[in-house]
Amino acid sequence: MTSESPQDIVFRYHRAWTGGDVDQAMDLIDDDITCRAPGADLEGKEAYRSFIGGFAPMLTGISDITAFAEADRVALFYYPETAATTTAPAAEFFTVREGLISESVLIFDRLSYGPPNPDRGAQ
């Protein structure tokens, strides 16, 4: 068991995967993690690794990170910057148990991260 707070664990996880070190990020993920994400319910560490690992290489930066924490739950809000957008916000709500992230609810607009659509206007 770790002496780190749930918020410290979430920040360490977030810095790792957004910095491109998915393996280090996965060290903070429970083997039986559940994640609700737009268009997908993920079960288990390997499914979660594949999901995060597929997005991490698209990042060009991260901005405006803030968090709220209470007990073992942490909400994180930020702007993942990619070639497609720098203005689409993302939010994650984590549950940390015994020093590992065991649950995640991820909220973002999937369309903002796809190829530009001339009918939608600039993102």
Image (spheres, grey):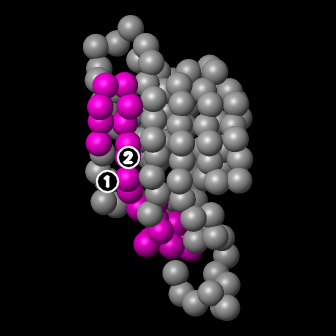
Q: Which residue is mark 2?
A: 76
Q: Position of residue 37 (x, y in %)?
A: 62, 48
Crowding at mark 1 (Cα within 10 Å: few <14, some 14-19, many 20+): few
Q: Residue at x 68, y 27 (%)?
A: 44
Region in magenta? 68-88
Dividing the image into 4 quarters, which one contains the N terminus? top left
* Residue 75 is inside the magenta segment: yes
Count of marks, rendered view: 2
In the current view of this chain or complex, which residue is farthest to the top?
1
Label 2 with label 1: CB-CB less than 8 Å: yes
**Kind of residue indicated by mark 1:** Ile
For residue 30, the mark is: none
Q: Position of residue 107 (x, y in %)?
A: 53, 53
Above or below, 29 relative to 37? above
Q: Is residue 37 left or right of residue 27?
A: right
**Kind of residue indicated by mark 2:** Leu
* Residue 70 is inside the magenta segment: yes
SS class, disc 1: strand
Above or below, 59 relative to 48? below
**Residue 32 visible, this orientation:** yes
Q: Residue at x 37, y 25 (%)?
A: 72
Crowding at mark 2 (Cα within 10 Å: few <14, some 14-19, many 20+): some
Q: Quadrant of residue 89?
A: bottom left
Q: Residue at x 51, y 73 (%)?
A: 85
